[in-house]
Image: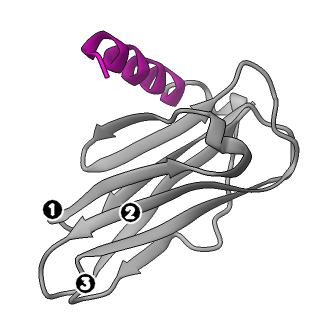
Amino acid sequence: MKTPIKRLLCGLLCASLSLPAALAANITASVTSITLPKGESTASFDLILTADKAFAGAEFGLKPSADDITLTSLEMLGEIGGNSPVQADKNGIHYFGFFTGSNAYQPGTYKVARLTYRYTGSASRTVTLTSSKTVT
């Protein structure tokens, strides 16, 4: 992807992260941390969103427990799959989201993305969901 487009997408994500809380609803996660088993080199998991009202997009922040954990793949899934994720890294947290111009998504449960991490070391590691919200 060309650098100006990356800058634009990162700028859009940063701008959306600074929107007032009144424009978004928090997501209540059933699982806020995934343990990556020791002795493995990769782990994948799906991120699922349940919304109780219509929304235009969502944002997520994921933080690995150590520096040897690297996000290698982020695949958008289901109805959300047609959207390219906006991504940015800040203070060791990987933020990503998807957005439309209107409340195009109805209340319900959505399989949003499949994330794959690569890691080294002999101890187990975790990836923690540090922030999440829907945008209306």
The picture places residue 8, in percent across and down from the top left corner, at 39, 14
Q: Distance between the residues labelled 1 and 3?
A: 16 Å
Left/right of residue 5 with respect to residue 97 in the rendered view: left
CA gap, disc 3 and disc 2: 12 Å
* Residue found 67% across the figure and 35% down from its top: 57
Element class at badge 3: loop
The outermost residue toward the top is 4
Residue at the disc numbered 2: 116
- Residue at mark 3: 40
Determine whether 69 is above or below 86 in the image: below
Residue that carries the numbered disc 1 in the rendered image:
67
**Which part of the image, by quadrant, shows the N terminus?**
top left
Amino acid of disc 2: Thr
Task: Please state the extent of the stretch shown in magenta in the rendering.
Answer: 1-17
Foreground mark, 1 or 3, reads: 3
User: Which residue is rendered at x = 57% and y = 73% of the image?
Assistant: 31
Residue at point 49%, 50% (across, down): 75
- Amino acid type assigned to the residue bearing label 1 in the image: Asp
Q: Nearer the viewer, residue 69 or 26?
A: 69
Tell me which amino acid carries mark 3.
Glu
As displayed, is residue 40 above or below residue 72? below
